[in-house]
Image (cartoon, helix red, strand yellow):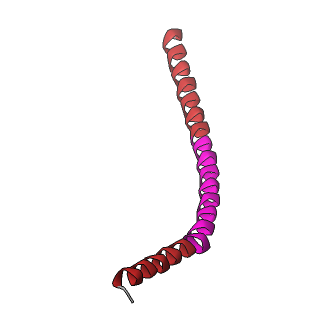
Amino acid sequence: MDKYKVLTIVNFVVGSAALSFQIGVLYPWHHQLDGDFKNLEKRHESRLQLFHDRKWEKLNEINTKLDQLLSSKEAE
């Protein structure tokens, strides 16, 4: 056989194997990773909302205490 013909066949076999791997393994794995990422994004969003709610509660507490201090200073 001519060495160029063998090289062409080897190239075709390697390319076919790579395509089969991409279709059989990487493509389904991509969908699984995409679903996992969306779940993680939802969890992160809920935790971020919880953090912001707690932050606003703390700021409101500080504001209330500051108003009480200012009103007690004015009363004196």
Please tell me in which quadrant of the rendered image residue 25 appears.
bottom right
Question: Residue 17 location, x and y as percent?
Answer: 51, 78
Q: How far across and how far down the image is residue 37, in percent?
A: 59, 56
Residue occupying image coordinates x 65% and y 59%: 35
Q: Is residue 10 depicted above or below 34 in this figure?
A: below
**Relative to residue 2, is residue 28 drawn left or right?**
right
What secondary structure is the stretch in magenta mostly built from?
A: helix
Relative side of 37 to 18, left or right: right
* Residue sitting at x 64%, y 50%: 42
Q: Is residue 3 magenta?
A: no
Q: Residue at x 62, y 61 (%)?
A: 36
Question: Of residues 45 and 26, which is closer to you in this image?
Answer: 26
Quarter of the picture containing the N terminus is: bottom left
- Looking at the picture, how far across and down is residue 27, in whole percent? 60, 66
Compared with residue 50, is residue 34 higher up or lower down, i.e. above or below?
below
The span picked out in magenta is: 22-51
| Name of the residue lying farthest toward the front | 2
Number of labels in the image equals: 0
Looking at the picture, how far across and down is residue 58, in whole percent?
Answer: 55, 34
Quadrant of the image occupied by residue 33: bottom right
Task: Answer above or below: position of 38 versus 27.
Answer: above
Residue occupying the far bottom of the picture: 1
Foreground residue among 33 and 63: 33
